[in-house]
Amino acid sequence: MNTPHTPPRDAADSVLRTRGRAASLVLFAIIGILIAAFFRLQVLRSSGFALRSVENRLRAIPIPAPRGGIYDRNGRLVAENIPGYSISILPGKVDSVRATLDRMAPYLGLSEQEREALLTKFRRFRHLPLPVKDNVGFEQVAAIEERRPEFRRAVIEMQPRRYYPAGRAIAHVIGYVSEISEAELERPEFEGYEAGRVIGKAGIERQYQHVLGGTPGVSYVEVNARGSIVSEFGPRPNVSPVPGQDIVLGLDLSLQEYVDSIFPEGERGGVVALDPRTGEVLVLYSHPTFDPNEFVGGISARLWNTLRSDPDQPLLNRVSYAAYAAGSTWKLVISTLGLRNGVFTIDSHMPTSCRGALQYGTRAFRCWKREGHGSLDLSEAIKQSCNVFFYQAGLRLGLDALTAGADALGFNRKSGLDLPVERAGFYPPGREWYDRRYGRRGWTESVVLNLSIGQGETQQTLIKMAQFYTALATGESPIVPHLLRNEAMEGRRVEWSLELPEERRLELVQALTRVVNEPGGTAYRHRLNDVLLAGKTGTAQNPHGPPHSWFLGFAPAYDPRIVVAAIVEYGHPDNQAALAVPVATRLAARYLGVTRPADAVATTPILPDTAPPVARPAEPIALRALPPPPSPRAFPSPAAGPEALAEEAAR
Amino acid sequence: MIPGPTNWMRARAGGRSGIGDPALVAVAGLLTVLGIAMIYSAGQVELPSAVSGVWRRQLVWAVGACGAFYLASRVPLRWLEWASPWLYAASICLLILVLVIGTGPNTRSWLSFGPVNLQPAELAKLATILMLARDLTGHESSRQRLAGVWRPLAIVLAPFGLVLVQPDLGSALIFSVILICALVWAGVPLASIFLLLSPAVSLVLGFSAVVWGVWFVAVVAFLYLRRTFALEAVAVGAANLAAGALTLPLWNSLAEYQQNRLLVFLNPGIDPRGAGWHLIQSKVAIGSGGWFGYGYGNGPQKRLAFLPEQHTDFIFSVVGEELGFVGVVAFLLLFAWFLSRVLRVARRSTNEFGSIAAFCLFGVWTAHVAINVGMTVGLMPVTGLPLPFLSYGGSFLFMLFAGLGVVSRVGAER
């Protein structure tokens, strides 16, 4: 490098010239590379990044669809949407949200736990406004609005709110609506639903959610990096919601309210009325009840716990979900099977006349009437509900015919009512079932005696029994009971029928009219003026207290327009009053527009005046003699059955 | 005191006073005005933000910085050359001080004086440049040998080490650039520069024994072929050996967060919520700008605060989003023009001290532009090096203008 002829300075200069050019080249290479990089990003790949940029700042906010209205058969509103308010808090720091919540608590009645739950929810969705309460009354909104400077982060929005004008009267029919839960979101039926959407949770609201719910719209809003909404008008157009459709029920709301008003206060039970010609449910009532409006928009934890722990179980639907021993109402099933199989006729007497009990093997099976009924034919036995007659009728029929016949009449199935939850009836399917349950030698044919009077190992729901009486009333395969008023629904019939000649059926109907309209009938004094009511009382023994009171009937007897069914738990307290009978008959009178005789009172003794009052009806001895069940699971869900529940309550 | 041939005296005699290169000052002024305009735009966000008002503070800084420019351009180079050891010593003291009482968001790099935060590292860059320029003036023959450059190496290593422990990796990088530029422009043979830097390469390659082995063999072969003096060769070889052996112990002695910081520095993608998030949002902003951008002040990524550090490190992303490719090219060409004017001053100057100083400043600013702009599109690691004229920040603007004053003076004295 150091050539001797060149002065060092010049050599250095030439090096520097080279290096200066190189530096210049490096500079322009850097600028060139940068321009190329920007060209790639901004020109070649611009569209992808433009899309990312839009997605970055757009949030899709669902617009709830207005829910369809629900009307009764007369056009009265069962469920409507009224203006309501929702309060939410804009996202921000957890501490400031907590402070706002704490200040709001006294005005909205938020408990400490509820606030903690809301904060937990907020921590999971930090970028979304926190919905505090959906169902806020006007006074509460006014209280917040007055203190606006304290609640700068609060957002108050108008939001249609579900309202059930009949409230408690229709709770078990209508169900309620509330926000979809995380568990529900995962179910296939709610595919495509988004968190936060309000859905039907029970009853009709749940059953017809897909009709009533509509399709929510979407509003695209622009948000900043912290998720706060900046503009309501994003670059994408909003999608309007599709409102839900209205539906009409076959229910008669005024009749339903009437039943609510006459149902004996302090008692528990259910009432159902059907139009046998169409299968429409006219009344479906369960007592005690609750106000479904309190469930809308989230029920308070306190109220929920009260309802859940209430020993009277207001949430239980006693028409379609509670199952009971059918009691004497079952005698018509025995009668039907006997007449069908030809083992007896309407005039048949049984070999042993009633002396208050029937000796079978080593045991005496009692009749409810200690002094006995004497020798009765079938018609009289139905009228007076003689157990001794039906013990023998059942024995003559035999266990196999009895279990097979009951199964053929659908007593192991559901009625098909259009409600989300229904319990199927249960009747022992045959000998194998008894062998499994009690062991091969653990039981005898005496089970037939209990089964003949609707006791023993059987449980039926009120709607299921009402379906059987509908078949008795019309002689056809009953139409599947339905709440929705719809022609397609009226075409659906059950797959079984009585298979009884019309003549035989009319004989049974006549016997049923005698129950109500002849002195000595178990429901005498509950007859109706001008209309012939046919019906059957029932006294269902149970190990937990006084018998349950049943009544099933239809009117007019030979041109039925209504089938009524009622049950009052422990409604037969002193053998003096059968609480279910007046409820059912008054309902029928009201529907048919007829009066009742002057001597018919709300609760009357059902026994003939001549019969001496009995302190307590004897339980069928066989029931006590039954060995304890080997496993609680062998019997269909006894734990959830009303008996078990009542047992829990009694403790 | 003043060594070497009296080039600078000749220059003084025939030199002009004033601002030297008017085009340089003009393009710098234009960039300053555009920079404040971009800081104003960066403050136009939908969230209430402290960034909204910083353009006013930057304006105040710019006025002050013009004063610094004027003063620096009035100081004769020989005074500067005389003062450079004192400046250097002072800045080293400040760098030590900042380690003791420093403040800052992530690193201890600021000295707080009431409302004003000073970054001693910025002053140290200028002072080190001047000190190097002074040290490398003259001694041409001695610089031909590797042993002749130990003093420049020591001059840079002191501030380099001090900013590294802050830790301010970006500034440490700039000190390396300063050293290389000074040696290059002082006529040090490229082979010497290569050998000087080889231990640093060993330090990085030490993670893999095989790769380091290959490198070491190459260095030894190079030493042999260049017929380097034995002592120098031994020193270089030993330094490479030591560096390669120290890599893993050094790495393991670092705390995990320090290791992570280094790894993220090299690859922001491994930290998608931190540095990676910045890079993604920056690319989205720039990419969505397209040919012409969303228009000045209208960039949605910036407006909705998706763009982080939009007034400092990522201000060029705002340029990309709002002014599009066209605006980006315009800015880059302005930078190219500005930097080439600085290079022109360095090349034309006959004052060795001034020439080296100007070339170092050219190198530093070029590195700032390349790293900052490259960072916004993912070509460079996210280092936090500001973009000259555009990024908000007083210390950097002051030193930029002071350096500009020096360059002007160099241009004026020829």
Image (tube, helix red, strand yellow):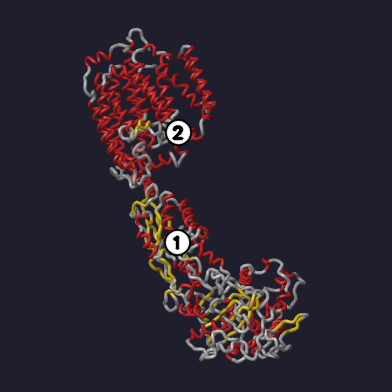
- Residue A429 figure quarter: bottom right
The span from disc 2 to disc 1 (Cα, nearest Å) is: 54 Å
The circle drawn on residue A109 is 1
Asked whether the viewer can see residue A274, the reply is no
Residue A528 in picture, x, y percent from top left: 53, 89
Residue A567 in picture, x, y percent from top left: 58, 78
Residue A176 in picture, x, y percent from top left: 48, 67
Q: Chain of mark 1?
A: A
- In this rendering, position of residue A482 left or right of residue B347: right
Question: In the rendered image, which residue does mark 2 sit on?
Answer: B266
- Type of amino acid at the residue the image marks with label 2: Leu
Asked whether the viewer can see residue A193, the reply is yes
Residue B399 in picture, x, y percent from top left: 32, 28
- Residue B163 figure quarter: top left
A126, above or below B412, in the image:
below
State the residue at coordinates (41%, 66%): A161
Q: Chain of mark 2?
A: B
Q: How many marks?
A: 2
